[in-house]
Image (cartoon, rainbow, N blue to C red):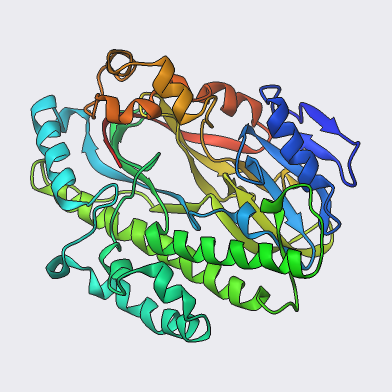
């Protein structure tokens, strides 16, 4: 499906891959497109929806500047998936319930973290020296982090909100493990700290913005290099965090299912991050806020909601999207609106056949609160091709 709409009233155009977009999201895109350092155009993916400062599902190429709030507070949030040698014949409801309970014991979720005796030091320790250098230069970060050990204890933990761990079946009945998480509390603390510094810089330089959450660091400014170091650290932490969780989940499966191997390449991709790339002949910073990189041949993961299908995709390298694609179904309503509209009974109906929580505590994540994933995929046929279609049989929520 080609671009559905082009808005050309701003300093640079806005190219949108969907007709399902509300006025507030349009205004956020217009605010971004008005900034003097935005390069060529702004791309809005088919899962686009309202965010903080910048819309979720947007791709923003910037010349010699980065907007920390556009990168977001869950730096490096993303997905990981792998296919196993198991098939649908190797699992049943009884064994899956045991796996659900095992994962719930082995992988801390929400605000929980590993106990000191269970910290994954082999994975966390390589990050310590770089973090020490950051806190030496910005000692205020230590207060933001709380207990110094906390970030180590959170290595290999899920978090809350829309983060999840799933066991899925693909179109041929093959078993997959898939999960969604990011850089946990440490990434959030880094993001909040630098977002506030960017706001203070704007005030000091008397730069007036259409939205204070579009505060930015220009290259060469006092905090630019420090933010790049912090965001790089958090993105690498998020990747490692997901890899650790996959290991824990595979061990949990191994305790209750027949012996198996991982039979495909592990796909591990960010969808909240910033990277240096070249687009339309210029070296730029590309912020993907709720979008994945989809260069020609890139493997990616596009999940639906906790009761819908998900997709393993290969990028087509469309330059108009800055070689990007949607990162998921995208919310169609806020969490508060979902809690008012739906009940636990609705959640149970919409997740029929999936072993998962079905209580009021996760009603805000009900499938009805999300856009239709098949429509999202139809709208981005020029961005990715589908390799596998997954349907969850088990979902552990944060």
Q: Nearer the viewer, residue 150 or 300?
A: 150
Q: Taking 131 as reference, is 346 left or right?
A: left
**Does residue 215 appear in this view?**
yes
Q: Taking 376 as reference, is 148 left or right?
A: left
**Does residue 253 appear in this view?**
no
Compared with 108, 207 (above or below) is below
Residue 118: quadrant of the picture:
bottom left
Assign the C terminus to one quadrant of the image: top left
x and y, in percent, of residue 276 in the image:
68, 66
Q: Nearer the viewer, residue 378 or 211?
A: 211
Q: Please give the name of the residue rendered at 65% of the width and 38% of the height, measured from the top-left corner.
A: 383
Q: Please give the name of the residue rendered at 65% of the width and 41% of the height, measured from the top-left corner.
A: 55
Compared with 139, 324 (above or below) is above
Q: Please give the name of the residue rendered at 40% of the width and 23% of the height, measured from the top-left corner.
A: 339
Compared with 346, 56 (above or below) is below
Q: Taking 287 as reference, is 9 left or right?
A: right
Q: How many marks?
A: 0
Q: Nearer the viewer, residue 270 or 81?
A: 270
x and y, in percent, of residue 268 in the image:
43, 54
């Amino acid at each position: 499906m080609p671009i559905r709409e082009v808005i050309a009233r701003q300093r640079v155009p806005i190219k949108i891959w969907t007709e399902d977009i509300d006025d507030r999201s349009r205004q956020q895109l217009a605010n971004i497109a008005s900034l003097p350092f935005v390069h060529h155009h702004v791309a809005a993916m088919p899962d686009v929806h309202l965010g903080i400062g910048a819309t979720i599902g947007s791709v923003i190429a910037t010349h010699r500047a980065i907007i920390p709030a556009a990168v977001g507070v869950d730096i490096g949030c993303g997905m990981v998936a792998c296919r196993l040698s198991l098939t649908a014949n190797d699992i049943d409801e009884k064994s899956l319930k045991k796996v659900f309970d095992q994962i719930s014991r082995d992988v801390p979720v929400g605000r929980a973290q590993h106990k000191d005796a269970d910290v994954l030091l082999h994975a966390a320790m390589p990050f310590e020296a770089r973090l020490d250098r950051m806190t030496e230069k910005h000692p205020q970060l230590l207060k933001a982090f709380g207990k110094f050990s906390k970030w180590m204890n959170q290595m290999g933990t899920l978090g809350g909100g829309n983060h999840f761990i799933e066991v899925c079946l693909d179109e041929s009945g093959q078993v997959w493990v898939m999960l969604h998480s990011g850089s946990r509390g440490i990434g959030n603390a880094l993001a909040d700290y630098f977002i506030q510094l960017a706001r203070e810089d704007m005030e000091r330089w008397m730069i007036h913005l259409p939205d204070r959450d579009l505060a930015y660091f220009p290259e060469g400014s006092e905090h630019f290099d420090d933010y790049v170091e912090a965001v790089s650290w958090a993105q690498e932490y998020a990747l490692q965090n997901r890899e650790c969780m996959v290991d824990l989940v595979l061990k949990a499966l191994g305790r209750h299912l027949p012996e198996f191997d991982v039979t495909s390449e592990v796909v591990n991709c960010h969808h909240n991050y910033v990277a240096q790339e070249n687009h339309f002949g210029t070296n730029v910073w590309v912020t993907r806020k709720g979008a994945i990189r989809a260069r020609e041949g890139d493997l990616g993961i596009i999940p639906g909601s906790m009761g819908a299908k998900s997709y393993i995709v290969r990028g087509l390298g469309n330059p108009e999207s800055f070689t990007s694609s949607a990162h998921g179904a995208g919310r169609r309503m806020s969490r508060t609106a979902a809690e008012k509209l739906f009940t636990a009974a609705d959640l149970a109906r919409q997740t029929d056949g999936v072993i998962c929580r079905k209580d009021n505590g996760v009603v805000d994540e009900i499938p009805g609160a999300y856009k239709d994933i098949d429509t999202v995929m139809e709208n981005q046929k020029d961005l990715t091709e589908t390799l596998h279609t997954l349907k969850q049989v088990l979902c552990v929520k944060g």
